[in-house]
Image: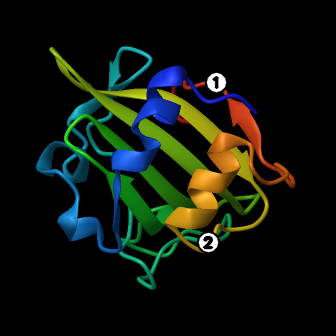
Amino acid sequence: MTPPAVVIAQLAHVTEIRRFASLPAPIRTGKFTIDGVSAAGWQIAEPGGAFSATDVPVPGAPGRRLIFAACDPQLCLLHYERGGIAHFYEILALSLTSSGWKALWNARGSKPLKDLDALQSLLRGDMPSDGWSQQWVKGDF
């Protein structure tokens, strides 16, 4: 697994965030793009909050739940679980560009990461990828 150089370069500068409400406003409100398409309507539950963990939707609950995030002014890494037919964990890297926040990179795994230290170790290659793999950042990843 090889994250983009900009992600690796910023890893030492990000700060762990444990609440969705503490993320930058454009990310909270889905004002970012994924493969050039607006992420309007993108939702994620607070850690421990209700979400649709299976393919049977929970009324009013999003299909994703934040585990933690790590951000600095130019980069935000979201680590969350995603429900549906298959339940898995993701890391989404968002980068602030001159035209706003854009999804830059995505990875998927079968187990959650404990904290920012574990995320940094995984992305730097200091620990085995242990079921984590890169995904194309396109559409409803």
> How far is mark 2 from mark 1, CA to CA?
22 Å
Foreground pick, 38 / 76: 76
Residue hosting label 1: 136
Foreground pick, 47 / 87: 47
Among the 4 quarters of the image, the one containing residue 141? top right
Q: Residue at x 55, y 26 (%)?
A: 137
Among the 4 quarters of the image, the one containing residue 74? top left
Q: Going from the N terminus, do you reach mark 2 or mark 1 first?
A: 2
Position of residue 85 measured from the top left corner of the image (x, y, whole percent): 75, 58
The reply to whether residue 82 is visible in this rendering is no
Position of residue 128 measured from the top left corner of the image (x, y, whole percent): 85, 51
The reply to whether residue 69 is visible in this rendering is yes
Position above or below: 4 against 41: above
Residue hosting label 2: 53
Position of residue 133 measured from the top left corner of the image (x, y, whole percent): 77, 39
**What label does residue 100 carry, if any?**
none
User: Type of residue at label 1?
Assistant: Trp
Position above or below: 20 against 130: below
User: Type of residue at label 2?
Assistant: Ala
Helix, strand or loop status at disc 2: loop
Q: Residue at x 19, y 41 (%)?
A: 73
